[in-house]
Structures are given as C-alpha cells and as structure tokens.
C-alpha cells in the first residue's frame, strides 16, 4: 500500500486531542488520544475518563507538579465537552 502526501492540508498540524474508536476491540468504546507530550489514551466513561495507556509519564514531564497534571486533565474534560456540543448540539 502506498501513501502520498498531497501538498498542505487544511490542518497544519495534528490536533492536540483526537477521538479514536476501534469497534473490533471495544464495540461501544470512545477514546481520546492526547497527541502531544505527555501522550496518553483515555477512555470516555459516564462519570469521566479512564487513562488506559500512558505513553509519557505525567510526573516526569511536569516534574511532579500536580497542578499541571490536573490542568491537563481539566483541558481534556473541557475539550470533550466542547466536542460533544459541536457534534450533538447543546443538549
């Protein structure tokens, strides 16, 4: 299989958060991939998120600063809320 890059796309760089799904592995699972360091994969739960794969250590990246770790997780929640409003409307 060959892949070719055709000039510049509308998206200049990979977004910080991406929605991911693999129905063959988890039929109803919705995941969010954080593409920048510290990189991680979170599964959307009814009451929040489950970190299912931590690629880069949060503690090492933020030198143990809990406020920065919590800030990142709050940005994740805010981003997902905005995504749902964009996709489904403000219900």
Image: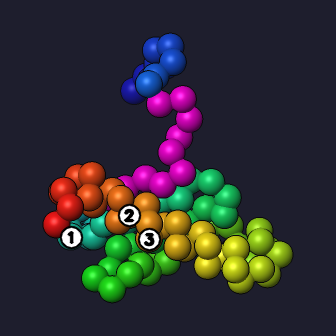
Residue at image x 52%, y 73%?
74
Residue 4 visible at all: yes
Q: Where residue 67 sits in the image (x, y, percent)?
A: 70, 80
Residue at image x 48%, y 54%?
17
Residue projecting furthest to the top: 7
Q: In which image quadrant can residue 10 be found?
A: top left
Q: Dot 1 lies on which element?
A: loop
Residue projecting furthest to the right: 63
Is residue 52 located in the magenta-colored stretch of the structure?
no
Q: Which residue is mark 1?
A: 28
> Relative to 30, does residue 15 appear above or below in the rendering?
above
Question: Of the residues tagged 2 and 1, which is closer to the observer?
Answer: 2
Colour scheme of the rendered structure:
rainbow
What range of the chain is rendered magenta?
A: 11-21
From the viewer's perspective, is 21 left or right of 71?
A: left
Task: Mark 3: give few (<14), some (14-19) or many (20+) Cα within 10 Å.
Answer: some
> Relative to 39, does residue 49 appear above or below in the rendering?
below
Q: Which residue is mark 3?
A: 77
In contact (CB < 8 Å): disc 3 and disc 1: no
Is residue 20 located in the magenta-colored stretch of the structure?
yes
Give the camera-side residue of 7 and 4.
7
Q: Where residue 1 sits in the image (x, y, percent)?
A: 39, 27
Residue at image x 66%, y 63%?
38
Give the camera-side residue of 87 and 4.
87
* Quadrant of image for the C terminus: bottom left
Question: Of the residues tagged 3 and 1, which is closer to the observer?
Answer: 3
**What label does residue 11 carry, if any?**
none
Cα distance in 3D space between marks 2 and 1: 17 Å
Q: In which image quadrant can residue 30 be found?
A: bottom left
Q: Where residue 29 sits in the image (x, y, percent)?
A: 27, 70
């Amino acid at each position: 299989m060959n892949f070719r890059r055709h000039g510049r796309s509308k998206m200049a760089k990979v977004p910080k958060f991406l929605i991911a799904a693999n129905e063959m592995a988890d039929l109803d699972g919705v995941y969010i991939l954080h593409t920048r360091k510290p990189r991680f994969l979170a599964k959307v739960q009814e009451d929040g998120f489950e970190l299912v794969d931590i690629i880069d250590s949060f503690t090492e990246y933020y030198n143990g600063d809990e406020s920065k770790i919590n800030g990142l997780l709050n940005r994740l929640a805010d981003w997902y809320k905005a995504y749902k409003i964009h996709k489904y409307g403000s219900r």
